[in-house]
Amino acid sequence: MISGSCLCGAVRFQIDGQYSPIGQCHCYKCRKVTGAAAEAALFTAATNLTWIEGQDQIVKYVMPDGHWKSDFCGTCGSPMPHLSADGELYWVPAGLLDDDPEVEVTVHIYVDGKASWETIGGDAPQFPGDLPATQRQAILTQLKQIAQ
Ligand SMILES: [Zn+2]
Ligand SMILES: [Zn+2]
């Protein structure tokens, strides 16, 4: 079990069971949401994440095109875990974790859109856009099987 929380502590959650390694997204939307060079996040099956407190403090923003959303703590603004479109997985910003998840950054996506001032370190593979569909599907299928 690993725990996570926002900056002010109003929202707390825990993850039981498996989760993915960490992926970093360098797209401009993730830069806006985090204020940083990239968002670092991991996936877990929706059934693995339990809200301990403060779920009602979460504010949801959906871009006008409806294709992208951000959930954040209404008090301190920390980005919050949010469900995938099919409701089966949580996308969890790794910076929220209070315990060491003991996984590494294994992929960088949307590298073509990264900030000019960012130099990506490490030797994890880098993709110009999203993960190739086959790779993405393999990860999602694996996580869904784990959760069943
Ligand atoms: Zn907060
Ligand atoms: Zn992104």
Image (cartoon, grey):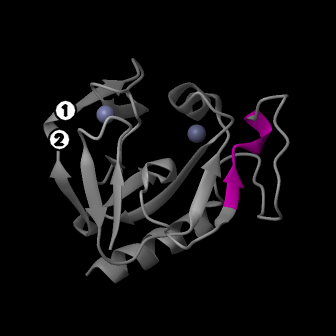
Q: Where residue 15 sits: x, y (%)?
A: 31, 66
Q: Nearer the viewer, residue 115 or 86?
A: 115
Tell me: residue 49, above or below residue 69. below
Task: Say which quarter of the image contains residue 23.
Answer: bottom right
Q: Where residue 62 sits: x, y (%)?
A: 35, 25
Say what amino acid the circle numbered 1 marks. Answer: Gln
Residue holding disc 2: 54
Left or right of 107, for residue 137: left
Mark sitting on residue 57: 1
Q: Residue at x 70, y 54 (%)?
A: 108
Q: Where residue 66 sits: x, y (%)?
A: 37, 27
Residue 136 included in the magenta stretch of the image = no
- Structural distance between the alpha carbons of marks 2 and 1: 5 Å
Q: Residue at x 28, y 25 (%)?
A: 75
Tell me: residue 85, above or below residue 15. above
Q: Residues within 10 Å of mark 1 (few under 14, many from 20)?
A: few
Q: Residue at x 85, y 42 (%)?
A: 119
Image quarter where the N terminus lies is bottom left
Image quarter where the C terminus lies is bottom left
Ligand 1 lies under 8 Å from the Cβ of mark 1: yes
- The local secondary structure at tag 1 comes to helix
Q: What stretch of residues is rendered in magenta?
A: 107-113
Q: Residues within 10 Å of mark 2 (few under 14, many from 20)?
A: some
Ligand 1 lies under 8 Å from the Cβ of mark 2: yes
Say what amino acid the circle numbered 2 marks. Answer: Gly
Asked if the residues shown at circle 2 and circle 1 are in contact, with their CB atoms under 8 angstroms apart, the answer is yes
Ligand 2 lies in quarter:
top right
Task: Say which quarter of the image contains residue 59.
Answer: top left
Q: Where residue 33 sits: x, y (%)?
A: 51, 29
Q: Nearer the viewer, residue 71 or 36?
A: 36
Q: Residue furthest top?
A: 64
